[in-house]
Image (cartoon, rainbow, N blue to C red):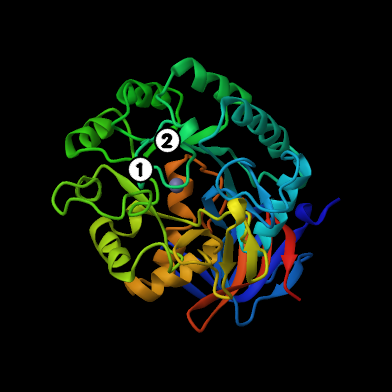
Amino acid sequence: MGSENKLLKIYNGQAVTPSGIVKNATVIVRSGVIEKVAEGNLDVPGAIELDAKGYYIAPGLIDIQVNGYNSVSFCLEGAGDTPASNGGLTVSDVKKVTEGLWKEGVTTYFPTLTTNSQDLLLKNFGILAKAMNDPFLLGSIPGFHLEGPYISAVDGYRGAHPLEHVRKPVWNEFLELYKASGEKILLITVAPEVEGAYEFIRKCRELGIVVSLGHHNGTAGQIKQAIDNGAGLATHLGNGCANTVNRHLNPIWPQLADDRLKISFIADGFHLPPEMLQVFYKTKGAENIIITSDITSYAGLPAGIYKIKHGKTIEKTVDGNLRFSEGGLYGSASPLRNGVAHIMKVSGCGLINAIQMTTLNPAYVHNLNDRGVLEQGKRADLILFTMDNERMFIQKTFVAGKEVYSKN
Ligand SMILES: [Zn+2]
């Protein structure tokens, strides 16, 4: 019998629930499921006891945009290629990423494939589909995010997505990918202005796929039509956008203005200035925001200088900024827990809201009803952590009741 089947009592901690922080809380876990969250030190005969004094207890973080971690890139030929990426993606690579993310407090994530050749996407979705069912992962991967290839071909909006592979949506081509993924593409990022986008969005919605707008320069009218047709989210709002835009007519205002659209953003402290995060937070409110990391294979690696293609070098700083040595942002290497701390710092929101934007909201949007909140009957995906000096430090991580990481 694994530890996930035993009775576990975590006590003396501060439990972060949607309705408040329960001080001196006891969380009881039975057979991998939360049985009770209550105030006080409850007597639980036969339970393994864990003293959580000094720690917060929250649901494990959910990251819907993970390109890679610790030298593994899910999309080997795409953005975020690393020197260590030789050969193709393997199931053991996926395990390595998952283990790494557990240390960062992420218990559920969507491996994200970005714009690439159909062959590579088919191949890697096949590998990911096989990996997600591996018992080792404990169900940490419920599905995938396909970011592209049906996005803007225009420089700036396209971001680091390779131009040669950007294309218009073709339903049968997408269905091939969907099947290769084991029908587990749960989220797709598309541009509303590409030819055929509205019909494509409708068809995705019929399959239950969440459609997010990103890497686009859609007009207000195009954005509205995309939302009318079922688009429900914006991908890393404020990024995947040209540096210089029209002050009146740009894609950011309409996405902020339409209450039907929820947004995701990268709150690592490097992708967006604090004022922009403040405005996004005030406009949409905690209930309509998902924080993502968008981390690449450089996350989890030590700070230092790394060689990339074309003789260039990039630098990862100790605080997780990943930039070209000559200047300019290269990508993200800052795990989601840094987004929790950063949004609190810049928006002034409390821990409850910061946790909501990194757990409950992504679970809700993707119908992952078995997780994402500290509540009776949910999977015991739990993190114990401290908040110190405006940073979040993970002490222990549990997935489905099983301890998968302990700092000590
Ligand atoms: Zn992107």
* Residue at the left extreme, as displayed: 248
Asked if residue 179 shows in the view, the reply is yes
Element type where label 1 sits in the image: strand
Q: Residues within 10 Å of mark 2 (few under 14, many from 20)?
A: many
Give the residue at x 57% y 31%: 184
Placement of 354 over or under 257, stated as above or below: below
Determine whether, in the image, residue 227 is placed left or right of residue 394: left
Q: Which mark is residue 186?
A: none
Residue 364 appears in which quarter of the rendering? top left
Give the residue at x 56% y 62%: 333
The residue under label 1 is which amino acid type?
Leu
State the residue in front, 345 or 15: 345
Are the two marked residues, 2 and 1, in contact with CB atoms closer than 8 angstroms?
Answer: yes
Q: Residues within 10 Å of mark 1 (few under 14, many from 20)?
A: many
The picture places residue 117, in percent across and down from the top left corner, at: 56, 29
The picture places residue 177, in percent across and down from the top left corner, at: 56, 25
Q: Which residue in the protein does label 2 denote?
A: 210
Check the picture and name the quadrant holding the C terminus.
Answer: bottom right
Placement of 43 over or under 125, stated as above or below: below
Q: Which mark is residue 233?
A: 1
Asked if residue 107 shows in the view, the reply is no
